């Protein structure tokens, strides 16, 4: 993210997406207690327009 900012990108933001299975049964719904999960990171930024031509 610092590299994007150093290169003139604006509105730099990062999100973490953690996913795990849901257990559905007659008694209700809850997240699985398995330690196996998946994490993904999404980074968004806007490139600043160049003023020179």
Image: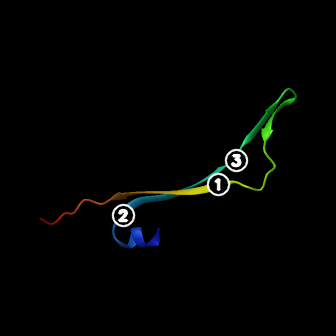
Q: In the rendered view, tell whether residue 46 sits above or below residue 28.
A: below
Q: Nearer the viewer, residue 4 or 20?
A: 20
Indicate the quadrant containing the C terminus: top left, top right, bottom left or bottom right. Answer: bottom left
Q: Earlier in the sequence, mark 3 or mark 1?
A: 3
* CA separation in Å, label 1 and label 2: 28 Å
Instruction: Decide if residue 26 is on the left or right side of residue 31.
Output: right
Q: How many numbered badges does the structure rendering display?
A: 3
Q: Give SS at disc 2.
A: strand
Q: Which residue is mark 3?
A: 20
Q: Give me the residue at 57% from left, 56% from top.
A: 40
The answer to which image quadrant residue 9 occupies is bottom left
- Residue 9 tag number: 2
Q: Earlier in the sequence, mark 3 or mark 2?
A: 2
Residue visible at 33% across and 67% down in the picture: 8
The nearer-to-camera label among 1 and 2 is 1
Badge 2 density bin: few <14, some 14–19, many ≥20, Cα 10 Å: some
Q: Work out whether 26 lies above or below 3.
A: above
Residue for badge 1: 38
CB atoms of marks 3 and 1 within 8 Å: yes
* Residue 13 against residue 4 in the figure, above or below: above
Question: x, y (%) of residue 5?
Answer: 40, 68
Along the viewing direction, whichever of 34 and 42 lies nearer the viewer: 34
> Which is more N-terminal, label 2 or label 1?
2
Q: Residue 15, how many percent across, how many down?
A: 55, 55
Quarter location, residue 30: top right
- Secondary structure at badge 3 equals loop
Which residue sits furthest top? 26
Answer with left or right where residue 9 lies relative to residue 20: left
Residue, x 78% and y 45% (percent of image)?
Answer: 32
> Closer to the observer: label 3 or label 2?
3
């Amino acid at each position: 993210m610092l590299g994007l900012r150093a290169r003139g990108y604006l509105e730099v933001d990062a999100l973490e997406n953690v996913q795990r299975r849901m257990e559905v049964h007659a008694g209700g719904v809850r997240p699985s207690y398995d330690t196996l999960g998946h994490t993904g990171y999404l980074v968004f930024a806007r490139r600043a327009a160049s003023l020179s031509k």
